[in-house]
Amino acid sequence: MRSPLLTYKSLQADNKKLLLAVLFGIYAVLNLVLLFAHEPWCDEAQVWLLARDAAVWKLPAQMVFEGNPCLWHLLMFPFAKLGIPYFMHNILSYLAVMAAAFLLVYRSDFSYGVKALLLCSPFLMYYYAVIAGSYCLIPLFLFLLADWFPTRKEKPVRYMVVTALLMQTHTIMFATSLLIMLCYLAETVADRMANRDDTGYVKRALCTLLPVVSGVLLFRQLLNGGDERWLQVKMTDPYRTVQKMLEKYGESVEKLCGLWPAIGFAFLVMGILFLLVLLIRKGSAAKYTVAVVTAGTVVYQLWFYAMVYGCSLQRFMTMGLVIIWGMWIMRTQGAGRGKYHPGEAVFCLFAVLVLLHTVSDMRADLDGPFSNGREAAEYIRQNLEPDAVYVVDAQAECSSIYPYLAKGTFVYAPTGRSYTYVTKDGHWTDRMEAAAFKEWVDVYDSQGKPIYFISSTVTNYIEGEVGTDTFTLLYESTEPSVKKEDFKIYKVR
């Protein structure tokens, strides 16, 4: 006969499992609802179009214009080549973030309240799970590294493989991955000096070469292309660099949660103080890894946004994911189970503020179209000839239409060249005057195929020409989209 105490503990354990299942289930369903309401925009389309229409050996060369490594494109490659519907792109992004959330709920030592707040925050809700892109791999790889941190010395291969893969998710994760590797190497050297009899150190040291190789591959993809390449560093003096970094931090925090810059800097100061306390207090060597990687990530990313490329919400929030990674490790390394800690409380407060400010983005995606590319493609499929020639006035914006269409020739008027994915060469943003465009249309040889003109909101080549013998309006987007990807389709001649 079981004792009442054992029965109570068993019921308590069952209730905890049920609570975790309910928490994860609600989170998964909410994101699924947002996923089915979402219309992919041109950045999402570009990845799928490259995977579908570019040869696999050409992908690394194209990355010089994309600004990111091609890991995510390669993951899309088999699905796109097999003709699987475009929606698979968003499904895979959703599944990657669900896997990360599963690790957070079932493998981390955070309290239920912290887990619930982190799941509901934009660090895991909507932005990475619904808007498809390589960002979705960042929480998955970071949470795997946090989960495997206690066994990193016994199983160095998997730990360094994921570290190397993290570097291939996005350029902004270069410093994070590099610092994780350097901290691991420093740990290995320190352990070797303390114990000369263990032969496992050679294996651990050799495994650190994996992120090094990953870094070489990263810059091999991004540093070709001369003046047209995406990765261009804007050099300036150190004082101006720091000033711009702080400006970018203030702008990003205000964009992220609507805080006044002063409050945003207060959070930054509190973060620095927590890192200092972390280094001073007694504890395992893990605190040095957490402090170095977290501080290094923030400094590198602020420098990146100030000197290389502007910041977006999805990019800026990756710093929050690194902070979650650090809190997870400190929990695992003896910070205690089920207890609240000041650092976690401050970060959860920040997460709540971010949620309150960004929930409007989720509502906008639910209430109206994120992009009108899908609607325009549906009109083309149902009403126009499948082998027609479509002349466009904006490569990037109009590309959100292409993944839904199996046939058709798309021509960019300023260059006169046909294309599917955005080439992003030196002419991809060229524009034409209305008179020049009309003259070009008159002489263009479509080889007997019907010609249609797709006009985006970026420009309007034919203002004043609608209703003439040359242009007849056939379609117009029913309502404005979040990303301002709205279209008009004209019959030409």
Image (spheres, helix red, strand yellow):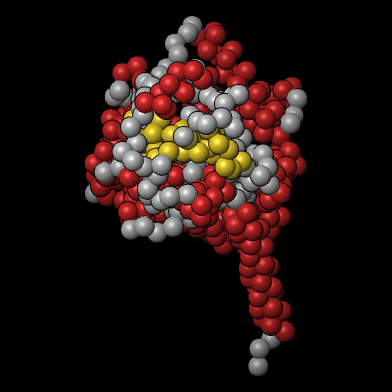
- Identify the residue at image location x=75%, y=25%: 260
- Identify the residue at image location x=51%, y=27%: 301
2 lies left or right of 309:
right
x and y percent of residue 10 in the render?
A: 65, 78
Pick whichever, 194 or 478, lies toward us: 478
Pick whichever, 64 or 257, lies toward us: 64
97 lies left or right of 345:
left
x and y percent of residue 76 in the render?
A: 38, 51
What is the residue that sits farthest to the bottom in this orientation?
1
x and y percent of residue 155 in the render?
A: 34, 54
Pick whichever, 112 or 283, lies toward us: 112
Looking at the picture, does residue 6 appear above or below residue 470?
below
x and y percent of residue 98 in the render?
A: 54, 57
What is the residue that sits farthest to the front in this orientation?
469
Looking at the picture, does residue 251 appear above or below residue 203?
above
Q: In which quarter of the image is residue 205?
A: top left
> Which corner quadrant holds the N terminus?
bottom right
Pick whichever, 477 or 147, lies toward us: 477
Q: In which quarter of the image is residue 8?
A: bottom right
Looking at the picture, does residue 377 appear above or below residue 278?
below
Count of numbered badges drawn on the protein = 0
Q: Is residue 315 visible?
A: no
Q: Is residue 418 visible?
A: yes
- Identify the residue at image location x=41%, y=51%: 386
- Identify the residue at image location x=28%, y=30%: 220
